[in-house]
Image (spheres, rainbow, N blue to C red):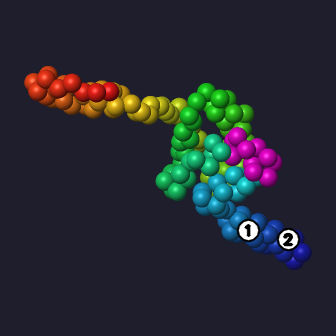
Amino acid sequence: MDKEAEPAVAQSIGEVMEATEVETKLNLNDAWTKVLAGYQDEKKSAIHTILSRVDIDSFEGKEQIVIGLQHNVEEEEYALHSSDTLQQLRAFTGNKALQISTELLEVVMETKLFTAKEKFEHLAKKNKNLLKLKQDLDLDIAY
């Protein structure tokens, strides 16, 4: 009887282990928060800043996470930590199919309009009728 009891015990231990694993799996948002906290504790502020800009709620239930990077320096920094980040997320969520990709965002730099001339030229670019109106009325705009 001892031989028959051993497989039953081993089987029940396996079931307990599987149940424990299921209970400890985190949703994507909680796993992301845990990864961020880990980087903050390790004083890795650059990767923490990059990852904290991601709206992880929009990727809940998906297997592909897209991280927007603003410039090449961020791309290099993320490349240093990408495998660790993905490995941690997969471990915390239990989702082995999870993938992370990056995209380089185009940052548009807007110049401030200070002088009256700059403001008029900017508005004239948007509305060509301003130049026509200025000519038709023979206006002399003091800059």
Tell me the tag on residue 20. Answer: 1
User: Which quadrant would the C terminus be assigned to in this image?
Assistant: top left
| Residue 104 position in % (x across, y down) | 53, 31
Q: Residue at x 69, y 52 (%)?
A: 36
Q: Residue at x 63, y 31 (%)?
A: 75
Disc on the earlier residue, 2 or 1? 2
Classify 10 Å Cα crowding around label 2: few (below 14), some (14-19), many (20 and above): few
- Seen in the picture, residue 122 relative to 48 is either above or below; the reply is above
Residue 110 falls left or right of residue 32: left
Q: In the image, is residue 33 part of the stretch drawn in magenta?
A: no
Tell me the tag on residue 117. Answer: none
Q: Nearer the viewer, mark 2 or mark 1?
A: 1
Query: Decide: marks 2, 1 in contact (CB < 8 A)?
Result: no
| Residue 11 position in % (x across, y down) | 77, 68
- Seen in the picture, residue 33 relative to 74 is either above or below; the reply is below
Residue 63 falls left or right of residue 50: left
User: At numbered mark 2, what does the secondary structure look like: helix, strand or loop?
Assistant: helix
Name the amino acid, label 2.
Answer: Glu
Q: Report the front residue among 91 and 10.
A: 91
Q: Circle 2 is placed at which residue position?
A: 6
Main secondary structure type of the part rendered in magenta: helix
Q: Residue at x 56, y 48 (%)?
A: 54
- Seen in the picture, residue 84 relative to 59 is either above or below; the reply is above
- Quadrant of residue 129 within the rendered picture: top left
| Residue 73 position in % (x across, y down) | 65, 29
The span shown in magenta is 39-48
